[in-house]
Image: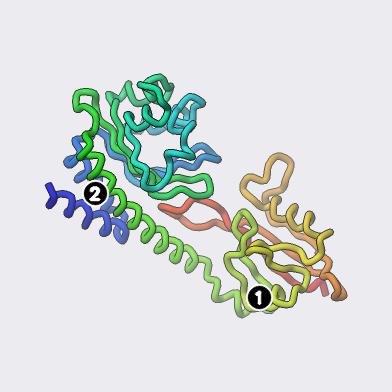
Amino acid sequence: MADRWEEITESIYRAALEPGAWSDVMSMMKAGFRSQAETFYFLDFAPRKVRPVHLCGIGDGWLARFDELYFTPDNPWCIHSRELHRPGVVRTNERLDAHTHRNGTLYRSVYYNEWMRPQGLRYSIGNTLLAQDGTVANVTLLRAPEEGTFSPDEVLAFERLTRHFERALDIAIRLESAALQGERSTRAFDELAHGVVILDPRGRLQYANRAAQARLARGDGLALRDGVLGATLAREQPRLESLLRKVLPDAGPGLDSGPARLSLARGDRPGTLVLSAMRVASGQARYLASRAAILMTIADAA
């Protein structure tokens, strides 16, 4: 048995570098834990969507209904997400009952009765590998009723293996993040005379070319506060925030999602700045959430 866990561990780290190897990992998990379905996925709670990394044992039709039936008001995994969707907290049906002080908690939910049970699934074991910004990454195994629940030894083995999953995912995300940064060709921006910055949807600075760095350093119309781009003048801050909202994916009804411009006062310096912002794609990410970035150019009005 120890040899089997060692083999799975080696495959987990190989999958961090070769995403196609996750299928091998999950096949070995299936054999080691006698599961009927093996899942590795991200849950994005704001859009209420699942992003699969690798799923086995779940049909396309059931996957299509997952978002509808998982994000229901009575699903205890959603109700207690803050406490249970944390890295290192192994979840089983029995541990859910202990947490809620109620037997059969899962079996009363729409998620179980309309999604798990029709597929012949009853018992689950899962662990969270990442939890941040409304997104969790989970590895979950599901068993049929006749297989019985997961034993204490299996829970311990699963906990140890998913620690390696957690480290491997961190490696994979770091590699993917570096690759996406490379796709943006930011080096070319340093040759431009005007400023260029890339912001995340919260306005946090991800990149600034040389011209933008110099402008931020002298507080020329724009400044950084805890890593977030802001206006030097307090009265201009709401206008800057409005500009950024206009180009976000979730801009909302009535707001233009295309390029937007703003003339911004420079503070104690004469003249104004012209800011032009647009949404840019973040690339085809496997692990990172599909969140657009904001590309902004900064130039003197003259």
Q: Nearer the viewer, residue 95 or 188?
A: 95
Seen in the picture, residue 146 relative to 142 is either above or below; the reply is above
Where 279 falls versus 152 (above or below)?
Answer: below
Image location (x, y in percent) of residue 218: 74, 77
Q: Counting residues from the N terminus, which is met first, the one under dot 2 or under dot 1?
A: 2
* Residue positioned 27% across, 58% down in the render: 13
Q: CA distance from mark 2 to mark 1?
A: 45 Å
| Corner quadrant of residue 146 | top left
Circle 2 crowding by C-alpha within 10 Å: few under 14, some 14–19, many from 20: many
Residue type beneath disc 2: Val
Q: Nearer the viewer, residue 57 or 214?
A: 214
Tag 1, which secondary structure? helix
Q: Are marks 2 and 1 in contact (CB under 8 Å)?
A: no
Q: Quadrant of residue 149?
A: top left
Residue 236 percent across, percent down from the top left: 81, 60
Residue 250 at x, y = what percent? 63, 45
Residue appearing at x 74%, y 41% in the figure: 254
Residue appearing at x 74%, y 68% in the figure:
222
Q: Which residue is mark 1?
A: 213
Within 10 Å of disc 1 (Cα), the crowding (few <14, some 14-19, many 20+) is some
Q: Which residue is mark 2?
A: 25
Specify the amino acid type for callout 1: Gln
Give the residue drawn at x 75%, y 58%.
240
Between 260 and 32, which is closer to the camera in this rendering?
32
